[in-house]
């Protein structure tokens, strides 16, 4: 098989660039453009092979191909082949194509190297599926110890033949020796003995090393377990005659209470609950949806065992649980320490053009609003990070956008909210008007529409957006529609200097031209096959 496929594969790779250039230059068929292609055959075990409009499982089916159908392959990418068959163009899975016609026995086919393995499941049977995915249909159920012939292994799946049928199984349930056979290698497997060390309740032993796996047993504190391996926070074990997985953080090298070192954290810290209002929820695990085990009032002393991803594992009032670490402080609320006295703050003022400024519970747009601050309100700024300022205003703590704070009170000269250094540019759109938005995102509300040639003052530019003032209003516009010279003045403008000409090449129907480079963007036109287009730029699959 290698000797037959390799020339065709290399030939296809060498011709890919030429093919792509010709096919994009004009809508010609492969024969007309003299494109060199490869020939293969449909190879399905049963039924027909779907030829789809594009290389995705969800694409519409343009034809159904019988076993042995001869196809012309233009290119292969990510498991899909672009082909022509029975006078139609489309895409099929490369899994169902072969270099030889089914039933043709070649020297290469005889030389295929296979391996023999055995089904090794702890309980039940192993599903053999039609393709190498969990959602594929089951073609057979294989009992423990079944001998299988393995053709290939990839991404956790093995392509096999068993009991006269072809299919795919998970590689983790195959072994090189028949279950029950003791080999020299098996005899020297190194295991460790550990003990269950939970503070309360029991430890769940699960079918696999994930939180959502089914529970096969509950292990009490002090239970002795045999550990086969440990990976990514999970231990594969045997306990009470059962195999399964448990979290490594609840295992210790010595039996709890034996006087030896156990898994209890050696280093802890003391902190205090510091909420502005109400109480702090202590949850069963470090996620917002976990059940609440206790409510802790402001000033409650807690012992912190660990801190990770915004959650602290604690003990408080004799109970264990997790709380958000942003509501813990190293000093008791109301206690003034030397360190607290030296915290450096700055004073700023709310500077909004209209309405009021939302002060939120945390530094995200979706956080709840704790207060609305009017223009000119004096605030104390503790820190600034990622466009948000942690502040105190009118006796309330919260977060506001740094865009709407200034170092001087609005109306006070000089006004430092205006950048010292600005540049002048002009709106340069080919048609229509340019949207000026409230913030630098496509979803922000539109505050004005600027016509071509409008003069704007640019304060700053970042990530494709410019903060500007135009026609007496402040806002943001896309930098790609601004130029240093007024359109038509004869100076260099923002129009791309280098363009290419290409043609629409669709096999059927028309090509959607969208407002922006995403599938969900609105359609502004439908282009028929052969339409000539001018390409300014190409990025991430969009032109």
Image (cartoon, rainbow, N blue to C red):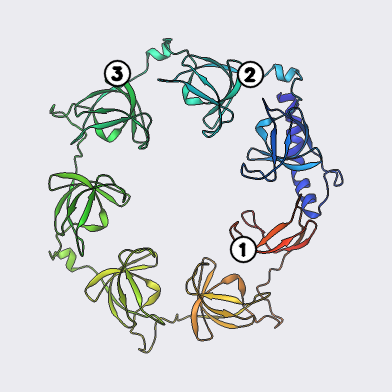
The circle on residue 241 is 3
* Percent x, y of residue 153: 56, 27
Residue drawn at x 52%, y 16% as measured from the top left: 117
Residue occupied by mark 1: 522
Number of numbered discs present? 3
* Percent x, y of residue 139: 57, 24
Count neighbours of disc 1 (C-alpha within 10 A) and say few if under 14, some if 14 to 19, many if 20 or more.
few
* Percent x, y of residue 400: 34, 70
- Looking at marks 3 and 2 on the same chain, the residue that comes earlier in the sequence is marked by 2
Above or below, comparing residue 409 to residue 480 in the picture? below
Above or below, comparing residue 502 to residue 16 in the picture? below
Residue occupied by mark 2: 113
Q: Are marks 2 and 1 in contact (CB under 8 Å)?
A: no
Residue 138 placement, left or right of 325: right
Q: Circle 3 sits in a helix, a strand or a loop, which is it?
A: loop
Residue drawn at x 32%, y 65% as measured from the top left: 368
Residue 214 placement, left or right of 179: left
């Amino acid at each position: 098989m290698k000797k037959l496929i390799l020339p065709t594969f290399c030939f296809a790779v060498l011709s890919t660039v030429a093919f792509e250039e010709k096919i994009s230059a004009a809508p010609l068929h492969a024969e007309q453009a003299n494109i060199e292609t490869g020939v293969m055959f449909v190879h399905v075990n049963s039924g027909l092979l779907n030829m789809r409009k594009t290389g995705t499982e969800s694409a519409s089916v343009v034809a159904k191909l019988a076993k042995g159908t001869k196809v012309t392959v233009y290119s292969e990418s990510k498991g899909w082949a672009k082909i022509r068959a029975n006078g139609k163009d489309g895409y099929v899975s490369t899994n169902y194509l072969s270099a030889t016609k089914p039933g043709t026995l070649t020297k290469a086919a005889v030389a295929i190297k296979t391996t023999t393995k055995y089904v090794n499941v702890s309980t039940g049977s192993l599903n053999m599926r039609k393709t190498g995915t969990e959602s594929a249909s089951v073609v057979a159920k294989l009992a423990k110890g079944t001998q299988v012939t393995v053709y290939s292994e990839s991404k956790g799946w093995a392509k096999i033949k068993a009991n006269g049928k072809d299919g795919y199984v998970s590689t983790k349930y195959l072994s090189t020796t028949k279950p029950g056979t003791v080999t020299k290698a098996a005899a020297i497997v190194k295991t460790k003995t550990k003990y269950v060390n939970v503070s309360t309740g029991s430890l769940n032993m699960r079918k696999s090393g994930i939180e959502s796996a089914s529970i096969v047993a509950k292990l009490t504190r002090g239970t002795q377990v045999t550990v086969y391996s440990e990976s990514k926070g999970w231990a594969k074990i045997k306990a009470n005659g059962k195999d399964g997985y448990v979290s490594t953080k609840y295992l210790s090298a010595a039996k709890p209470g034996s006087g030896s070192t156990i898994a209890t954290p050696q280093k802890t810290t003391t902190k205090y609950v510091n909420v502005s209002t109400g109480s702090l929820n202590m949850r069963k695990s470090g996620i917002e949806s976990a059940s609440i085990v206790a409510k802790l009032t402001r000033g409650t002393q807690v012992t912190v065992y660990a801190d990770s991803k915004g959650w602290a594992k604690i003990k408080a009032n004799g109970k264990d649980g997790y709380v958000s670490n942003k509501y813990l402080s190293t000093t008791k609320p109301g206690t003034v320490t030397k360190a607290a006295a030296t915290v450096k703050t700055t004073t700023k003022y709310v500077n909004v053009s209209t309405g009021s400024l939302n002060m939120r519970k945390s530094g995200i747009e979706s956080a709840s609003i704790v207060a609305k601050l009017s223009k000119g309100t004096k605030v104390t700024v503790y820190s600034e990070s990622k466009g948000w300022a942690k502040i105190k205003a009118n006796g309330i703590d919260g977060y506001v956008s740094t865009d709407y704070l200034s170092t001087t009170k609005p109306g006070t000269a000089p006004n430092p909210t205006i950048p010292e250094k600005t540049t002048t540019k002009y709106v340069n759109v080919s048609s229509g008007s340019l949207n000026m938005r409230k913030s630098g995102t496509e979803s922000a509300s539109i505050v004005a529409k600027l016509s071509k040639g409008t003069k704007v003052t640019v304060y700053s530019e970042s990530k494709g957006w410019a903060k500007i003032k135009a026609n007496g209003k402040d806002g943001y516009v896309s930098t790609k529609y601004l130029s240093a010279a007024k359109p038509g003045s004869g100076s260099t403008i923002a129009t791309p200097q280098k363009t290419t000409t290409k043609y629409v090449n669709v096999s059927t129907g028309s090509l959607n031209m969208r407002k922006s480079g995403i599938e969900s963007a609105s359609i502004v036109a439908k282009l028929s096959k052969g339409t000539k287009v001018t390409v300014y730029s190409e990025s991430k699959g969009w032109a």
